[in-house]
Image (tube, rainbow, N blue to C red):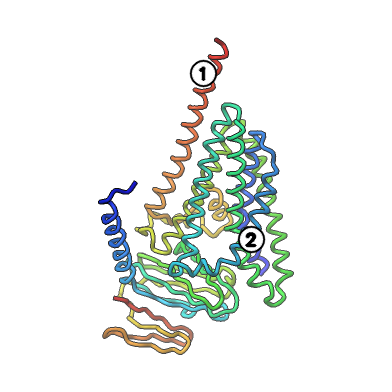
Amino acid sequence: MISHYSMPFIRFVVAALTLMSFLTIAKRPEFQIELKNHLFFPSEIEIPENTKVKLIIYNRDQTPEEFDSFDLNREKVIFPEKKSVIFIGPLPQGRYEFFGEFNPNSAKGAILVTPQVPPQVSLHDIDNREFNEIGSTIAFQQNNLTESGVVYVD
Amino acid sequence: MLINTVILFLRDALPVFVVMAILLSLLQQQSIKANWVYISGLLGMLLSFALLMATDVIAHAIDDTGREWFYASLYFGCYCLVLVLLSHLAVGNIINFSARSKTITRYSAITLVAVIIMLNGANFLIYFTGFWHKNNASNVLSTGVVLGVGICTSIAILLYFMMEAVQHYYRLIRETLLVFFSAGLLMQSTNLLLQIDELPIGNILWDSNNIVLENSEVGYLLTVFFGYDATPTLIQLLLYATAIVAAFTIIFIRSNSALRNGNRTLKEVAL
């Protein structure tokens, strides 16, 4: 039986925990990758060492895929034309490989954990390649095959 | 694609075959008829299809973390069911099973196997149905499933007879395997909660990939049987150890209590 005085306390605890969890999540840097024709774009992304990050994976294919990484201990199904979210890190420096479990020969990629702070990029719309500035810092890295981006949400 | 289908089938089906072999052996020891296997198999497959239909909705619930919550809660539920099973079987090993205990054990086994089939079956069905129409892959997928069933059945039969053989040297072999299997489910549960940031991740304690690679054949087997994780964190290790200790404590307490009750009954009969 919950006493008369317990309810406000429980409400306070729930509210505090909810607020704390939102604050914690809000601080996580976000990284995005997408899957097209059973290939990951970008195939390599850089994340800062010892930092927990949020990874958003978009599946642009008509078939499901399972993001899998033994190095990262992560496994997540991404349904056709949907997105999935996972958290990774904090990790020491190194290369952490991932692959698409349903198409392991083509869908391959790696997370590079680097000491330096990676460029801060807003990647709002991958399809249209529109990159909007958040705050004062923005950078965009592009090579022939891949693009990499990170956005810090305050 | 054939090899991939076999690998995926083994990953999802092997735990089902292993738990079925262990439970079949355990329940036969208590003279419980094996028809529960068919019931749980059928129920599990129906639930798998139902979960397949709802999996997209579940996956995108709770801010795209619904699937993790759903699977983690059910894996935890499976661990609890194993504890219920073990507590009744511990008594059944000492004194005769009561009709109530027999019913609870039977229904617990049915639920446990059905839930594991549902969770793993839905995983495989996502792949199977997703690629069925792609480039006439149906033949390859069917062949992969047939090969996978053959391998899983062979492993399950070997395990069944291995338990029979080892029982002469170690009486609790089946219970021990079930305890480690259920602790493995709990490990999967923690992994899912870690990846949605609902458990503190902490630092990785060690990396045993250089001893047994997690994605090797041995790694797969160890994962199914013992919940092997090459890169565990402190919280995972603590939960794993606690799960095993809790299960063995329950077996010990229930066995001792049954033994005391049995001795008391014998004394009363003697008097």
Q: Where does the image place residue B260, in percent across and percent down from the top left?
A: 49, 22
Q: Is residue A51 visible?
A: no
Q: Which percent across, then down, holds residue A111?
A: 43, 72
Identify residue type, mark 1.
Arg
Q: Residue at x 63, y 55 (%)?
A: B44
B127 to the left or right of A47:
right
Asked if badges 2 and 1 are on one and the same chain, I answer yes
Q: Quadrant of residue B162?
A: top right
Instruction: Name the residue located 46 percent from the left edge and 42 percent from the top edge.
Output: B244
Task: Pick whichever, B182 or A147, lies toward us.
Answer: B182
Circle 1 residue: B264
Q: Residues within 10 Å of mark 1 (few under 14, many from 20)?
A: few
Q: What chain does badge 1 belong to? A: B
Identify the residue under disc 2. Answer: B9
Whether A76 is drawn above or below B175: the answer is below
From where the camera sits, is residue A113 visible?
A: yes
Q: Earlier in the sequence, mark 2 or mark 1?
A: 2
Q: Residues within 10 Å of mark 2 (few under 14, many from 20)?
A: many
Quick check: B20 above or below A141? Answer: above
Question: The C terminus of chain A appears in which quarter of the rendering?
Answer: bottom left
Q: Secondary structure at mark 1?
A: helix
Whole-percent x, y for residue B237 in the image: 41, 50
